[in-house]
Image (cartoon, rainbow, N blue to C red):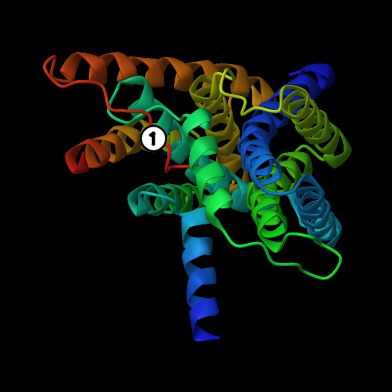
Amino acid sequence: MLGKIKSFGEFAYDFVIGDDWVVAAGVVIALAITYGLAHAAKVSAWWLIPVVLVALLPISLWRAIRKH
Amino acid sequence: MSQLGAGVALFVAVFLACAVEAVEATTIVLAAGTARDWRSAGWGVAAGLALLAAITAALGPAVTKLPLPALRLFVGALLLVFGLQWLRKAILRASGYKGLHDEDAIYRKQLAAAESAQARRLGMVPDAYAFTLSFKGVLLEGLEVVFIVLTFGGNARNVPLAALAAVVAVVAVALVGLAVRAPLARVPENTMKFVVGIMLTAFGTFWGAEGAGASWPGSDAALLVIAPAIALFCLGLVVLLRRNRSASEPPPARVPAEVS
C-alpha cells in the first residue's frame, strides 16, 4: 500500500512539477506577488509574470545544460 | 479579440496539444498490437478511454462551476509550469543539447519489450500484457488531454469546443496511425511541442495574471502580443544556445527511452 502511495506521489510530482522544481516555485511566487500587489496595494502588476518568465526560462535552461 | 478569434485560438491550442499526446499514445498502442495481440490492445484502448471519460464526466462540471478568477489563477499557474517545461525541452532539443524525440526508436524499444514478455490471459482479454500496455499508454497520455480540455475549455467557458478539438486531434492521429500501421515518426513533434509550449505559456501568463487580480492592457487582445513575444524570446534563446554550444561537441543521439 505504502509503495502504491509512493509511486502515485512520484507520478503526481512528475506530472505537475516535471523536471525542474525551480520553474514551479518561480511561477507560484510570481503569481503570489501579483495577487498581493493587486489586492493589498491595488496595483495591476500584469507585467510581473512576463518579467519573471524572461528570468526563469534561461535559469532553467542553464540548470539543464549544467547537468548535461 | 473577437469571439471567433478566441474560438479559433482555443481550438488550435487544444488541437495541437492533444495531437502531440495522441502521437505518443498511438506509438505505444501500435507496439502492443503489432508485437502481441490487436484484440487485447483494442480492449486496452477501450478501457483507457472509458476511464478517461469517467474522469472527464466527474471533473468537468466541477471545473466549470468554479468562480472564474480562482479557476484562472489555478489553471494559469499549471499552464505556466507545463508550458515552461515543454519550452525548456523544445529549446534544449532545438539547440542540440538534448536528443530529438524519436517515435521510431521508442516504437522499436516498446516492440522488443512486448515480444519478450510472457503471454497470460486476463478474463475475456487474450493477452494481459498487450491490454495493460495499451491501457497505460492511453490513460497516461489521455490524462494530459483531459487536463488540457478541462482547463482551456473551462477558462474560455467553452468546454464543448475544447472537447471537439481534442476528439478531432485524437481521431485524426489514430486513423493515420492505423492506416500506416507504423509509428508517426514524420510528425514534426519537436516543432509542435515548441508551438504548444508557447501557447500554454501565453495562456498561462494571461489567465494567471488575470486570476491574481491584474488587468491586461487591451484585455483579451493582449494575448496577440504575449504569444508572439514569447515565441521571439524562445527563438532568441535557441539561437544563443546554438552559438554557445561547442562546435566540437557532436549532436546528441535521438533518445528512445524518453517518452515525454
**To which quarter of the image does residue B11 belong?**
top right
For image coordinates 82% across by 54% down, the residue present is B43
Q: Is residue B144 left or right of residue A6?
A: right
Quarter of the figure that contains the C terminus of chain A: top left
Count residues near mark 1 (Cα–Cα under 10 Å), then give few for <14, some for 14-19, many for 20+: some
**Amino acid type, label 1:** Val
**Label 1: element kind:** loop
Residue B153 % position (x, y): 78, 40
Q: Residue furthest bottom?
A: A1
Q: Is residue A5 left or right of residue B211?
A: left
Q: Is residue B94 visible?
A: yes
Question: For this rendering, which residue is in front, B54 or A46?
Answer: B54
Q: Residue at x 73, y 48 (%)?
A: B146
Count of number-bearing discs: 1
Instruction: Identify the residue at horizontal 77%, vertical 45% (top origin).
Output: B38
The answer to whether any part of residue A43 appears in the image is no
* Residue in front for this viewpoint, B217 or B247: B247
Q: Position of residue B45 (x, y in %)?
A: 78, 49
Q: Position of residue B137 (x, y in %)?
A: 64, 50
Subunit that carries the residue with mark 1: B
Residue underneath mark 1: B255
B37 shown above or below B156: below
Query: Residue B65 lies in what quarter of the image?
Result: bottom right
Q: Quadrant of the N terminus of chain A?
A: bottom right
Residue A67: give x, y in percent of width and height: 20, 43
